[in-house]
Image (cartoon, rainbow, N blue to C red):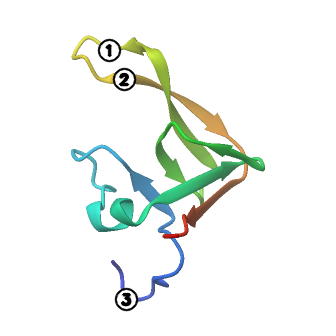
Amino acid sequence: MPEDQNPDVPPNHLSIDPRSAFYDEEILVRGVGILVNGVEKTNVHEYDVAEGWVRVEVPTAKDRRGNPMVVKISGTVEPFFRSTE
């Protein structure tokens, strides 16, 4: 985690794909929720707050390697840590 990153705020860019440079297992274990245009999304594959987009998985579609297909949605992205209660 960068030194200037607040530990109570999720990173600006995060991915659940271990092959991605933006993958961070420690952050994902804490539980990150995503609001896109005020609506919580539970199928987010990757997000970028600065650029204002999320990639969500299409539940029934797979690419030729068997990975889930993703669709890019633009809008206001608000990540948050889920409570541990």
In the depicted structure, whether residue 73 falls above or below residue 70: below
Query: Which quadrant is the N terminus positioned in?
Result: bottom left
Q: Answer with mark 1 or mark 2, whichever residue precedes in sequence.
A: 1
Q: In the image, what residue type sits under mark 3?
A: Glu
Q: In the image, what residue type sits under mark 2?
A: Pro
Q: Residue furthest bottom?
A: 3
Q: Can you tell which mark lies on residue 80?
A: none
The residue that appears at 47% across and 20% down in the rendered structure is 59
In the picture of the structure, the residue carrying the numbered disc 2 is 68
The residue that appears at 48% across and 70% down in the rendered structure is 84
Residue 81 image position (x, y, % from top left): 53, 67
Q: Is residue 28 left or right of residue 43?
A: left
In the picture of the structure, the residue carrying the numbered disc 3 is 3
Residue 60 image position (x, y, % from top left): 45, 12
Q: CA distance from mark 2 to mark 3?
A: 33 Å
In the depicted structure, whether residue 50 falls above or below residue 52: below
Disc 3 crowd, CA 10 A, few/some/many (<14, 14-19, 20+): few
Q: Quadrant of residue 14?
A: bottom left
Contact? badges 1 and 2 (CB < 8 Å)? yes
Residue 21 image position (x, y, % from top left): 27, 54
Q: Answer with mark 3 or mark 1, whichever residue precedes in sequence.
A: 3
Q: CA distance from mark 1 to mark 2?
A: 6 Å
Q: Is residue 80 left or right of residue 28?
A: right
Q: Is residue 28 left or right of residue 38?
A: left
Q: In the image, what residue type sits under mark 1?
A: Asp
- Closer to us: 64 or 43: 43
Q: CA distance from mark 3 to mark 1?
A: 37 Å
Q: Can you tell which mark lies on residue 63?
A: 1
**Local secondary structure at mark 2:** strand
